[in-house]
Amino acid sequence: MTHAKRRRRAILAAAPWVFTLGFFLIWELLVRATGTSTFVLPAPSLIAEALWQFRGPLSLHSFHTAWMTFAGFALAVVFGLLLGMALGASRLVHAGSYPLLVGFNAIPKVAVVPILVIWFGVGWLPPVLTAFLISFFPIVVNVATGLATIEPETEDVLRALGASKRDIIVKVGIPRAMPYFFGSLKVAITLAFVGSVIAEYNASNFGVGNLMARASADFNVPLLFAALIALAVLGVIMYAATAIVEKRMTGWAQRSQMASA
């Protein structure tokens, strides 16, 4: 590896930290320069104090949010992958079920939470199911798209060689859909956090959403922002883990020099 490439790789590795620290520094300076009230927008230094002061509750509730989000996300991956393969492999299934999926996805999931509470009560199940309901649609759409965009010429050649429809799906369709699949996972994991927090805010005794509801009721704005920072950190960790798995499994799909630079 040349010196220029090592230097560029070091710059890229440092860029997230520099940009993040720069963002919080600008935030701190603007709040202090404008004299903005803590009730409106606390400075990052006050948020850091709240993070340390409430580190126990934040850690406990973050753990609950993480596992509920991951459980809902795992359900979304399994269900979305299976349904996406069904939609991509069958025009009949696609034509029949796609309007239902689009209509269901258009329903605000916050409106579904009261129904889940009626069915399952207050607890861990509504956040898990809300995370699942809000995150499975991108997976279905992307997997179905990956399977449905196999070139007709490729299918003709494979059929001429004696391949069945199942062979085409397994050996060509699924590998082709993998970049679409992992792209959808990076969207779905952030949506899963939205779903779990919405349900925790309204239908749970634990989780960061519940902590935010109590902080809002107490007008503890620094704690409210500290909870948002905790959610952001959890989201970045889950996103990064998904990106690492994607790079290991679909690195062959990156042909662009800009994507790999």
Image (spheres, rainbow, N blue to C red):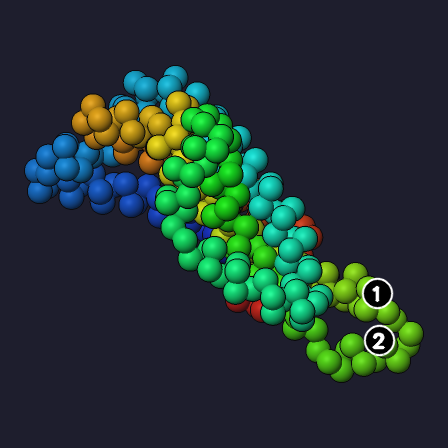
Name the residue beneath numbered marker 1: 167
**Residue at 31% in and 30% down:** 212
The image quarter in which residue 2 lies: bottom right
Residue 167 vs 190, above or below: the answer is below
**Residue at 53% in and 59% down:** 101
* Residue 124: assigned label: none
Kind of residue at badge 1? Asp
* Residue 158: assigned label: 2
Query: The residue tagged with tag 2: helix, strand or loop?
Result: helix
Instruction: Please give left or right for residue 153 compared with residue 149 in the image.
Output: right
> Percent x, y for residue 120?
49, 30
> Percent x, y for residue 134?
47, 48
The image quarter in which residue 45 lies: top left
Give the camera-side residue of 190 and 23: 190
Task: Classify mark 1: residues with Cα within 10 Å, few (<14), some (14-19) or many (20+).
Answer: few
Instruction: Please give left or right for residue 73 compared with residue 36 in the image.
Output: right
Q: In whole angstroms, how far apart are the C-alphas of marks 1 and 2? A: 9 Å
From this viewpoint, is residue 247 visible?
A: no
Residue 52 vs 100, above or below: the answer is above
Task: Classify mark 2: residues with Cα within 10 Å, few (<14), some (14-19) or many (20+).
Answer: some
Give the tally of numbered discs: 2
Quarter of the picture containing the C terminus is bottom right
Residue lying furthest left: 35
